[in-house]
């Protein structure tokens, strides 16, 4: 059954920043009738900041945050009352609202015709601002990638601010063990309006959340007078799950190498050429990141980190103490990635002493991760099929085929997990503790 829009147009209404309360407010509507307001509270700012750069960064957040509300009643027509795009920006937004919402489109049986094509509403914008501040912000989640990045920065004696976007008043306690004070930003999604919309038949699904988080980090970096925003993303997300026509269906398009370059280009073109955003870990496979984490971080964080979204990262959930559910694709993926490098009993202790390979409830999940029997790869941030096959192969070689055994045969893999993938050249200076 084809989708029939409930409303005619999605409206980007307004955004603002209150210098007294340090709160950013973003407002959207459908047909100027049904409204949604997102609020983001930044920490107190004690020093002057570049107001022009901040305004440009806020406009980027305004556009990206809109995906969280647009998805409820998607319309091919949009209206922008503020932050009018030029042609390059219109192309950028069209990419974000198709590629970035590809999983949402797939799961709701939408096509490109249901999604907006943004049009240029003004000629090329003025050149970027002259922005001189220096300093590093490193995004944190409590997962293996961001903790590894912090450890590499520590070993390289690089000063940085750990940065965490929270949906509640708390943050993972493991972040308090870092060698710098965590900077938190509180995101208040309009849950009341969203829940009401869902009761009225709204759609739901995944949005390009990494882009949204990165945009808020850029805003906060400008408020802090810093110029480098470090993400913690390996060579992941590039393997499509499916296709909608010519659109690759990707769980987290905004984590891909393509998306990182696009965002970096946007920032340099429209905010400030001196602001850098990207991931120093981009050149590493997920399996190599797991190996480095065990080598450099396991003793400190092995029983305090988690990559499980189900157990820790739902809206409003208190996630001070991170844990694992032991039932989701992220848990299965992490089990595969760490199996070659961590003693079996030690790894199983994270999951209540259970060998996840022997859990019947995870058999289909592992088939999807390992490309078996045509089972589709789970919609999660997980490793590549060949990479995960190699992880299983390495674990069985090191610890014995009788120790690790799935209830089906896994093909051999020649994946080169130590090969260095492309990354932004400037980011390599943060990897001196590896090379």
Image (spheres, helix red, strand yellow):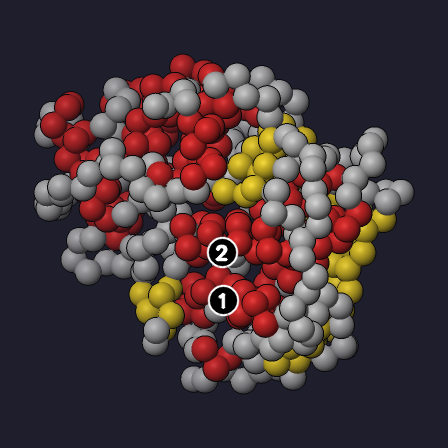
Q: Secondary structure at mark 2?
A: helix
Q: Which mark is residue 95?
A: 1
Residue 39 visible (yes or no): no
Above or below residue 33? Residue 142 is above
Earlier residue among tags 1 and 2: 1
Left or right: where 158 falls relative to 370: right
Could you say whether the residue bearing mark 1 is in a helix, strand or loop? helix
Camera-nearest residue between 52 and 5: 52
In the rendered image, residue 390, in percent from the top left (x then y), is placed at: 18, 38
Determine whether label 1 and label 2 are within 8 Å by CB: yes
**Residue 111 pos. (x, y %):** 43, 78
- C-alpha distance separating marks 1 and 2: 10 Å
Q: Depth check: 278 or 319 in front?
A: 278
**To which residue does mark 2 refer?**
262
Q: Quadrant of residue 106?
A: bottom left
Image height of 430 relative to 245, above or below = above
Instruction: Give the residue drawn at x 63%, y 37%.
Output: 227
Is residue 110 rendered to the left or right of residue 329?
right
Identify the residue at image location x=34%, y=19%: 295
């Amino acid at each position: 059954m084809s989708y029939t829009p409930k409303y005619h147009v999605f409206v980007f209404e307004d955004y603002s920043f209150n210098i007294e309360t340090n709160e950013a407010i973003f407002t959207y509507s459908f047909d100027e009738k049904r409204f949604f307001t997102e609020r983001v509270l930044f920490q107190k700012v004690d020093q002057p900041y570049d107001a022009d750069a901040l305004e440009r960064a806020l406009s980027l957040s305004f556009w990206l945050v809109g995906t969280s509300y647009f998805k409820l009643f998607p319309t091919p027509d949009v209206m922008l009352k503020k932050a009018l795009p030029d042609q390059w920006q219109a192309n950028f937004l069209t990419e974000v609202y198709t590629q970035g919402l590809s999983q949402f489109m797939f799961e709701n049986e939408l096509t490109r015709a249901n999604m907006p094509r943004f049009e240029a509403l003004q000629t090329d914008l003025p050149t970027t601002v002259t922005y001189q501040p220096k300093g590093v912000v490193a995004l944190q989640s409590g997962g293996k990638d961001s903790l590894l990045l912090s450890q590499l920065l520590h070993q390289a004696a690089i000063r940085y601010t750990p940065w965490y976007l929270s949906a509640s008043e708390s943050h993972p306690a493991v972040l308090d063990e870092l060698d710098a004070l965590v900077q938190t930003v509180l995101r208040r999604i309009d849950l009341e309006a969203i829940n009401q919309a869902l009761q009225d038949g709204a759609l739901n699904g995944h949005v390009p959340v990494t882009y949204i988080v990165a945009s808020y980090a850029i805003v906060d970096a400008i408020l802090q007078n810093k110029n480098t925003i470090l993400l913690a993303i390996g060579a992941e997300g590039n393997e499509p799950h499916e296709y909608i026509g010519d659109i690759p269906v990707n769980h987290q398009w905004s984590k891909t190498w393509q998306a990182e370059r696009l965002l970096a280009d946007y920032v340099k073109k429209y905010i400030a050429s001196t602001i850098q955003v990207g991931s120093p870990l981009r050149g590493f496979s997920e399996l190599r990141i797991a190996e480095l984490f065990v080598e450099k971080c396991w003793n400190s964080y092995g029983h305090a980190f988690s990559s499980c979204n189900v157990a820790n990262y739902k809206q409003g959930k208190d996630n001070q103490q991170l844990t694992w559910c032991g039932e989701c694709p992220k848990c299965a993926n992490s089990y595969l990635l760490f199996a070659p490098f961590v003693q079996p009993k030690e790894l199983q202790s994270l999951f209540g002493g259970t060998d996840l390979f022997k859990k019947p409830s995870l058999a289909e999940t592992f088939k999807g991760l390992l490309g078996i029997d045509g089972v589709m790869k789970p919609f999660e941030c997980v490793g590549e099929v060949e990479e995960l096959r190699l992880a299983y192969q390495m674990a069985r070689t090191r610890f014995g085929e009788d120790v690790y055994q799935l209830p089906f045969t896994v093909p051999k893999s020649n994946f080169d997990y130590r090969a260095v993938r492309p990354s932004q050249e400037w980011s390599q200076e943060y990897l001196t503790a590896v090379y």
